[in-house]
Amino acid sequence: MSELSTEALVCTTPRYELHCLRRRSLALTAAPTGYTIRCILHGCMRLSVSGEVVELHAGMTALLNPVARHTLRSKQGSVEMVTVHLHPGLIADMAARLRLTRIGQEFTFRDRVVADPHLAALCTSAREELRRRGIGHEVVLDALVDHILVHLFRHHLMVRRNLDLEFSRFGFVDRRLRRAIEFIHAHYDEDVRLKDMARAAFLSAFHFARLFKRLVGMTPHAYLMGVRLEKAARLLVTTDLSMLEISHCVGYASQSHFTKAFKAWTGLTPREYRQASLKPLLAPLPQGEE
């Protein structure tokens, strides 16, 4: 390929998000509250999650459970990646349609990294549909995401029994943390302190912080940051609010702090993310770069 281009494509819906990125270099650290698929279409990236480091080559896909904090960094040369964020409610709805729902169960990925040509082909089709944005592309993307979901249930998701889990509109949560999780989602735009979250769970700040980290895998404030950034992504696509207004709407006092956190989370600045949701961002890379 004699000439590559940078590209950013974003589609955000209440059920899922699709991101297609092609960059000279890419680095991000995220812990989305939903299920995440990251499929490498070109180049190589290094995935770090839970102390494990894995190299992802073209055709490989990372399957990440909710709130799995991970870091991705591209190696030499450009990289192209399709990311699919699936809301936990979408997983639950599909499980019900497939008659797989039972009380006291959750769905988790069997493997963290897979080489699945069919899944990669579906992600490639989603990218092409985002590029074209022709008549009815929303219908086609919905169908592709449903196809991805069924494929995941057939080959990559397993059921785990956990009687402490309850399903809420924010996904599967431990019943001991449900009130705190709901509090975070209701007050993410405020100056939320640890003691406020702990009070919602009827625990001391010390015991709440330890329990939250043990059950969720991250600190309460890290979870809060993720909620804020996901809300910001939705506002960038669905409103005309300025970057400053959005930063304040999601609880950031500083726009520069918000911009830095958002780019580290998504790989795009807030302005790039908004533009990518409207049309492709294209710019030629230097001749011969791979």
Image (cartoon, rainbow, N blue to C red):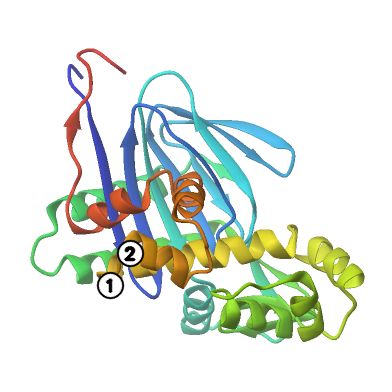
Name above or below for residue 116 compared with residue 102. above
Q: Is residue 83 toward the left or the right of residue 154 in the image?
A: left
**According to the image, label 1 marks what residue?**
239
Q: Amino acid at mark 2?
A: Leu
Q: Which image quadrant for residue 224?
A: bottom right
**According to the image, label 2 marks what residue?**
236
Do the residues bearing badges 2 and 1 touch, measured as CB atoms within 8 Å? yes
**Quadrant including the N terminus:** top left
Say which residue appears at 21% left-offset and 66% top-offset. Answer: 140
- Please, which residue is most extreme toward the front here? 253
Say which residue appears at 20% left-offset and 55% top-offset. Answer: 129
Say which residue appears at 46% left-offset and 44% top-offset. Answer: 116
Q: Is residue 154 visible?
A: no
**Quadrant including the C terminus:** top left
Q: Is residue 267 visible?
A: yes
Q: Amino acid at mark 1?
A: Thr
Q: Is residue 69 toward the left or the right of residue 134 in the image?
A: right
Disc 1 is placed on an element classified as loop
